[in-house]
Image (cartoon, rainbow, N blue to C red):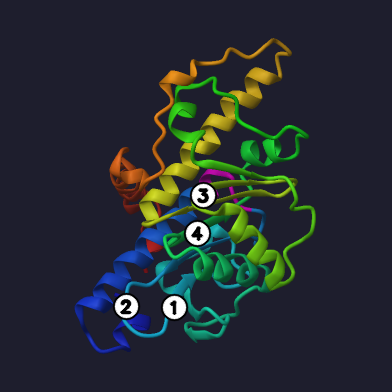
Amino acid sequence: MSAIIESRSSSKADEREWELRCDMAAVFRVAAREGWNEQIGNHNSLMLPDEGEPRFLINPRGYLFQELKASDLIVCDLDGKVLRGTGELRKVAFHIHARIHLLNPNATCVIHVHPRWLTALSLLRDAEMHLSHHNNLALNDRIVYDHEGDEPVHHNEEGDRIARCLGDKSTMVMRGHGVTVVGPTVADAFDECFIAERTAMYQMTAMSTGQAMHHLPERLRRRYNGPWGDRYDARLHLDAWRRILDREEPDYKQ
């Protein structure tokens, strides 16, 4: 266990935080493998389960996803002050993540990335997923499309607008920008983001043929907006990736 945790009094809360750090570090490494991040930009955050002042874990400014380790993540309050760890909180990350955490209490984990296919979808004038792939039956009732977000996220007002637009949905396709996915756990947000990106890939590939898209019947929609992992194998998916990382990139847990 890293010195960042060892320096605190040993407790079950500390052990729980370390396991959450390892989950988050695994998500960063997988996201790098999948090409989700924008150079040293993009951020993933997680509210820490503890009494007292709300705090969240997030990646510090200036790191590539593929180099991040569990001990690199910083702890910040909802005012953007770094409470523990080394490094600074990027302002755009604060305006997106802190405001979503503040206004959407169920958004325990927030993944904000620019993956290839969802970002390409966000560039289209009619940037919406068709009801064409079986994944859409689960996803389409969970997605909201931000049709107003032309402005870069440089202040709390824009962060608040994004949080309000997200509302009770869990995936937000941000026009001309990328995607934000939230969930009650790291595994929930990661798995839903992974599935949404794959589904966008299928759709964009089919659209590139120029042929008409097939539409699945509305009656087959799952119409489920609860925790993703309660219906799908989100935890098992993240655990599988962690086994790969344990063999190939074990330093993610340092």
Q: Residues within 10 Å of mark 1 (few under 14, many from 20)?
A: many
Residue 113 drawn at (x, y percent): 60, 52
Q: Earlier in the sequence, mark 3 or mark 1?
A: 3
Cβ–Cβ under 8 Å for marks 1 and 2 = yes
Q: CA distance from mark 4 to mark 1?
A: 13 Å
State the residue position of label 2.
50
State the residue position of label 1.
55
Cβ–Cβ under 8 Å for marks 3 and 4 = no
Is 253 or 147 nearer to us in this picture? 147
Residue 142 drawn at (x, y percent): 49, 41
Q: Amino acid at mark 1?
A: Arg
Is 81 or 246 nearer to us in this picture? 81
Of discs 3 and 1, which sits in the foreground?
1
Residue 214 drawn at (x, y percent): 58, 12
Is 148 or 69 nearer to us in this picture? 148
State the residue position of label 4.
110
Q: Which residues are magenta?
A: 32-37
